[in-house]
Amino acid sequence: MIFIIIMLFLLLIVFLIFINIQFKLFYFPSKKVRILEYHSISINGFEDQITISKEKIIEQFEYLKNNNYTTLWMSDLDDLQNKKQNLAPKTVVLTFDDGFLDNYTELFPLLKQYNFKAVCFMVLGRIGQDVDWNGQYVNENMKLMNKQQLLEIGSHIELGYHTFKHDNYADLSLDEIEKDLQQCHEIVKREKLNVFPAIAYTYGGYYRKKGVNQKLFFDVLKKAGIKYALRIGNRINVFPLKNSYEIQRIDIRGTDSMKDFKKKVIFGRKKIF
């Protein structure tokens, strides 16, 4: 009987550890940061994996505002981490990938309305151009913000890196990645843009397998001056951020219901098990 009780107790401990790893339930609120991943916003009600309707994102912003969430930039996290300060009890980072034109026409006014901050990870070699990379959810009608628009949004949107032409780093050699980052830096310098040294991996792709190659990959990022790199992962991050080049984001899809969104914000994902 004692043996059974001990085994049940050990199983409970293992279960609680698993739950904490997955959902960070037993961390103080000031030790958790949720980083949400968005892309494009539609004004005609269209929704898919990367496009959310304006009506739905307004509903999500209302939820964050009414539940006292604080929005920060990546540079804010970096500043708090360097000063060894805690986060606000409910902290979220709103991130938008690629730099679609609707981030200027639709997102920027909403951020001003709600007094929110967001981070836009730009495909820096395609500023002001049409989308020219392949993908199930992109088309030739999608356009990217131009330089003037990028300069105008600085009060509420911080810029970050999203590669030079939307390449998947998992498919590139280390030399190609180094060249890609050099090209990004050249654009930033030439266009005189204020870009924080954080990168969101396109397609969530990077050298995932731990070992020598991953270390060399991270060395390339460090050499290029990149402080933080963001994957997907769908988990809440513990603050201070320890794995600076494997920060996890929560994928917010246009097809998510409001119930899905709330689960993702609270737990990091909509499916608990």
Image (tube, grey):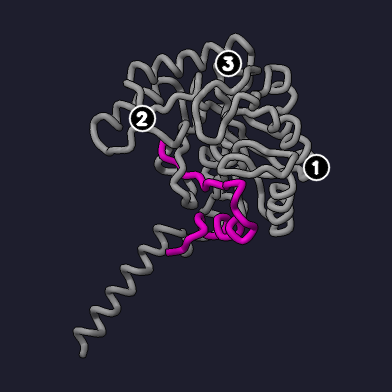
The image quadrant where one finds the N terminus is: bottom left
Query: Which residue is found at the position 48% from the left and 46% from the top?
Result: 240
Q: Earlier in the sequence, mark 1 or mark 3?
A: 1
Q: Name the residue under label 1.
A: 113
Circle nearer the viewer, 2 or 3 = 2
Q: Position of residue 186 (x, y in %)?
A: 53, 11
Q: Which of marks 2 and 1 is nearer the N terminus?
A: 1
Q: Distance between the residues labelled 1 and 3?
A: 28 Å
Give amino acid for label 2. Ala
Where 48 falls versus 223 (above or below)? below
- How dense is the environment of label 3, judged by Cα within 10 Å: few (below 14), some, or many (20 and up)? some
Give amino acid for label 1. Gln
Query: Which residue is found at the position 68% from the left and 19% from the top?
Result: 146
Query: Which residue is found at the position 51% from the left and 55% from the top?
Result: 268
Determine whether, in the image, residue 57 is placed left or right of residue 16: right
Q: Which one is nearer the viewer's eye here, 199 or 54?
A: 54
Label pair 1/3, CB-CB below 8 angstroms = no
Q: What element carries label 2?
A: helix
Residue at the top extreme, as displayed: 190
Is residue 214 in sight in this rendering?
yes
Which region of the structure is painted magenta?
A: 245-273
Q: Which one is nearer the viewer's eye here, 261 or 183?
A: 261
Q: Mark 3 points at which residue?
A: 188
Q: What mark, if any, has residue 263 been given in the picture?
A: none
Q: Name the residue under label 2.
A: 170
Q: Which of marks 2 and 3 is nearer the N terminus?
A: 2
Is residue 255 found inside the magenta-colored segment of the image? yes
Residue at the bottom extreme, as displayed: 1
